[in-house]
Image (tube, helix red, strand yellow):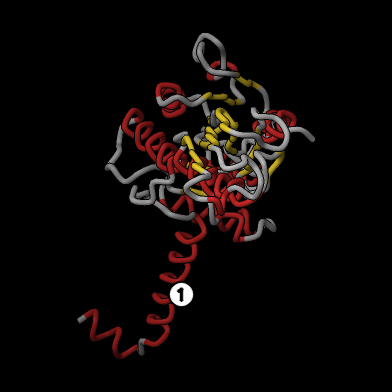
Amino acid sequence: MDVYEALIEERKAGRASALATIVNVVGSIPGSATAKMLVREDGSIVGTVGGGPAEAEVMLRAREVIESGKPQMISFKLRENPDFDMGMVCGGSLDIYVEAIVPKPVVYVFGGGHVGYVTERAARLAGFDVVVADDRQAFANRERFPDAVDVLSSSFASIMERLTPNSRALIFIASRCHELDAEILKWAVHTPAGYIGMIGSKRKVVTVFNTLTADGVAPDRFDRVRAPVGLDIGADTPEEIAFSVVSEMIAHIRRADAALPLSRSMRALAERSAAKIRSTTQKDEEQTPASRKLELA
C-alpha cells in the first residue's frame, strides 16, 4: 500500500493521521527529495522520509501534530547534530513539513423534532456535517433540513441498517419516545462512533440502561454514552439544549477535559442510582417497627 492509498483508507475510517513531506534538502538523501510518510493515529507508518534518527523524530512530532491539529516544520541541521545524519544527507540539512489530516466529523441526529431541528443548525454552524434521521416524513425532509448532508425518513431500523458511522462520528439521540431512543441506543453502542449522546432525564437514562442491559447489552458498552447529554449550562429551551449538546461535541473533538458534562457516563449514572436504591432499601430493612413508630411520632 502506498502513502495515498493509506491516507484514503484512514479518512474513510474517520481516523486522524499526519503527512510528513520532505520540502527542502541540502546534500543528498536516499530515494526522492520529496518523499512522503504517513503517520497513523496508532503510530504506525506508511512510506519513509529517509529512515534513521531523523525519521524517528518526525514520527514523534507527527503525534503532536495529530493531537493539536497544527502543522509543524521540522529542520535538521546535520552539521550541527551529526547523530541525525546516518548517511542520509552527507552533513547538509533537511526540512520536513508535517501536517494533520483530520476527517470532518459527521453528526447523526436521530429525531427531527424541536431539539433535533435546532441541534442540526447549531452543529452545522460549528463546522460539522449533519445527517438527520426520523421515522416521520413530516419531521425529516429537505424543506425542514435543506443544508443537511443527508435527510433520512423511514423506520429507524431500516435507517440504521444503511448507516456506517466511523470512529469520528457523533450520534445524538432525541427521538419522540423512550422506546425508540432505546432502540437507537442499542444500535449506536455497537458502532465505532466516538461520541454517543442521548437526551432525557436521569430517571429516563436509568430506565433505558436497565432495559438494554436486561436485554443482553453488556454494561461496559455504555461507558462512552453521554446521558443525560450536554454540558452543564442550565439549559432549558430547545435552543439552549442544542448549544449545550453541540458544545459537548466540540469538547469531545478538541479533547477539552475541563468541560463539565452533565454525565461522564451513562453506565456510571445508572450504577450510582442502583447503589443509592440498595442503600435506601438496606436502611429500611434495618429499621425496627419501634423505630418506625418513633419516626412517625
| Snapshot quadrant of residue 282 | bottom left
| Snapshot quadrant of residue 246 | top left
Q: Indicate whether 79 appears above or below 113.
A: below
Q: Judge by depth and name the residue closer to the eye, 117 or 108.
A: 108
- Residue extending furthest toward the top: 143
Q: Indicate whether 115 appears above or below 271.
A: above
Q: Position of residue 135 (x, y in %)?
A: 62, 25
Residue drawn at 60 percent across, 19 percent down: 150
Q: Which residue is denoted by mark 1 in the rendering?
A: 278
Quadrant that contains the N terminus: top right
Q: Position of residue 156 (x, y in %)?
A: 65, 31
Quadrant that contains the C terminus: bottom left
Q: Judge by depth and name the residue closer to the eye, 291 or 241.
A: 241
Residue drawn at 69 percent across, 58 percent down: 216
Q: How many marks?
A: 1
For label 1, the SS is helix
Would residue 108 be visible to someone looking at this image?
Answer: no
Q: Indicate whether 276 appears above or below 84.
A: below
Residue drawn at 24 percent across, 81 percent down: 295
Would residue 292 be visible to someone looking at this image?
Answer: yes
Mark 1 surroundings within 10 Å by alpha-carbon count, few (fewer than 14), some (14 through 19), many (20 or more): few
Q: Position of residue 290 (x, y in %)?
A: 30, 90
Q: Position of residue 175 (x, y in %)?
A: 53, 33
- Residue extending furthest toward the left: 297
Q: Judge by depth and name the residue closer to the eye, 61 or 87.
A: 87
In this rendering, position of residue 120 left or right of residue 238: right
Indicate the amino acid at tag 1: Arg
Residue drawn at 57 percent across, 31 percent down: 25
